[in-house]
Amino acid sequence: KSLLLLPTTTTTTTANIPSSSDQITELQCCLQSFHNPNNDNDYDDDTITIQKQIEFIQSLSKWNEELESQFTTSSSSSSLDEKNEEQIKQIGIELYSTFLWLLQSSSHDNLFSGRRNEQTSIVTFTSLPVEKNKYGDVSSYQEIVTQRKEDMEQLAMYLASILSQSSSSSSSPKEVEETTTMQLISELLRTMTNFIRWIMSSKSNSAASKSLTAFLTKGTICLSLTLLELSASSAETELNQQVARNASVLLFRTTHSKPNPLLQYFWITKNGYKLIAKLLLLSDISTPLLFSVVRHVHHVVASFPKRVGLDLLNDGLRDQQLLLQREEEEKSHEQQQQVVADATTVLIATLAWCIKSSPAFPGKDRINDRRSDIALEILRILFALGGDNASSANNNNRTNNPHFDLMTQMGILLADILHLPNANVATYEVKVASVSLLMDTPINYGYYLLANDCIRTILDVLELQVSSVVLERDVSGTKSSSFGGYSKVSGSKDDAAALTPILIVLIKYGTANPEILRQMKERIFPKEECDELYQKAIDDLPLSSSSSVSSSSIQRGGGGGAKNMSPIDNPSKRTLRYKVIKLMTWSESNIKRLSAELMWILCNSDPTEFILRTGFGNAVHMLGMRGFVNIPEGNSSGGVGVATTAEEMLQQ
């Protein structure tokens, strides 16, 4: 119903993405054609017909689709020519002014007809230190666009105040007019969000800072919060959910830049934490809106020190749940047992719903079904909180650990995630994120992983991750993953982020559990490879050293031990062992150390087997750290304060 007025227009394409200058010109033409269809000098504000609004919506939608396609497919940030700074700044002002003008000229009472409860409203505004008439008489777009930045901010706050005080009209709403206006509000919110994201991703910092002065204000925060609450409370239509989602994303983009005092204004001053808590508990919220809400939580967790932001969210969740329980008691006339869930509990419950709800995860429509994105975001939040929850996770005593049941639920959920198929990129990303959480699980959790055949699935992830980093690089030094996309050059931080967690997890559980180590060896050292290796070892090693050697006998590769510089059986490039060996000489130090240590424990800490399987050239660094080879101090990549083992890295 919400799209009834809009015929099917363009289809998203990844080809022929327009240049930055083309996008600037196109957006400027959209705005000018809406306000000045006759190309004369006077703005024609009085004849904004429904048809003109529909055409404007279609033009903005086309511009947004092209830019969003660029966000998805581009391998680098866009570049804006600094000579166009003034033009870009003016377009930003015109875009924001159009949004303010539309809200100023709309019938607020009918847009969100009466679905707002003033007594339970979260977003409130005090009287502004200016006379209402200063802005109440502003009805012309031309008046708005010529105002100073400070006046535009005050006008935005004034409009937010008017919107928050709107009530249901007794007259029947003009459905066609108001639906079209709501569609235009939604599309303008989307356009402003993409404009901010586009400028922020530009390589020209000066252009970015000057072009967004109209958007990055407290007025934008107030308007976004108000529209988010009003439209989210009107969940009866898809259009209201869409407006809420776009308002939430605009709020996220406005507060996302660093350093940004607007985040504190949103979360603390304007009680944003209360609204986010309320939205997290809604049962009829759309997945695109829920994904945006969860992103706010992630941003706050990462931005506020010492859990300040999270503690406020916990307070908001407690108050909202108690309010809902009181409402339920009034309806049922029965006293309810007070059970209050904190943010972590709510997030884990939401994660479980994403994985186990119908249709089967992750769904076929990733645009409208955002469960995979929600799950990925929640796993990243839990990982960010891992340092604070590590002590609870490692406390296996149900009596002393109030979070024992929660950690048990999370442990079961992680095993379920690890058994998801790898064929879908969305599912695979969720699996990789779940592996990172295993770094904070207790050692005894390894028995649960074994009992549920999870070591095999973790090794599947290892092979895909290692293959993605080692084998799929092109000649330019970049790589395309198994599921598309790109990464940076060999040894980059992207490689470390991809491989470090899973290497630490395998070292952690392989060292502690002999059965896990056995399964790892069977996967990385298949029996047919072992037979070939041992036969060649017998032929290559002196008779007295074919079974075992003392540590002193292979100093600098000498003595009676193994002397092969490369793996003695020359494993195929298709094998997992070859790929892990390749990482042992990687330029990124953490990957080099962890991959070497993984091979070391798989070789039972036996230096001869280690050299036979990996080659002395690849093994020398680990042998030096273990004291079997004397490495000159100047050639060591260790150094003071640098972790040299998985245990030390995990502690750091």
Image (tube, helix red, strand yellow):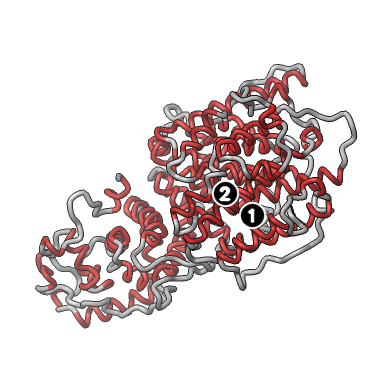
**Residue lying farthest bottom?**
539
Which x, y percent locates residue 595? Answer: 32, 62
Measured along the vertical axis of the image, is residue 513 above or below residue 103?
below
Sequence-wise, the earlier of marks 2 and 1 is 1
Do we see residue 276 in this rendering?
no
| 82 relative to 253, above or below | below
Which residue is at the far front?
A: 41
> Does any portion of residue 10 appear in the rendered image?
yes
Residue drawn at x 51%, y 48% is 414
Q: Residues within 10 Å of mark 2 (few under 14, many from 20)?
A: many
Q: Nearer the viewer, residue 261 or 332?
A: 261
Taking the image as shown, residue 50 lies to the left or right of residue 442, namely right
Going 72% across and 32% down the picture, which residue do you hit? 137
Relative placement, left or right, of 449 versus 215 is left
Q: Residue flagged by tag 1: what amino acid is it?
A: Phe
Q: Amino acid at mark 2?
A: Ala
Position of the C terminus by quadrant? top left
Pointers 2 and 1 in contact (CB under 8 A)?
A: yes
Which element is circle 2 on?
A: helix
| Residue found 79% across the figure and 32% down from its top | 109
- Residue assigned mark 1: 361
Q: Give the residue number, with chain letter if any, for mark 2.
A: 375
Residue 366 percent across, percent down from the top left? 65, 57
Quadrant of the rendered structure where residue 73 is? bottom right
**Would residue 559 appear left or right of 289 to someone viewing this image?**
left
Please name whichever residue, 46 or 99, is drawn nearer the observer in this view of the structure. 46
User: Mark 1: which secondary structure?
Assistant: loop
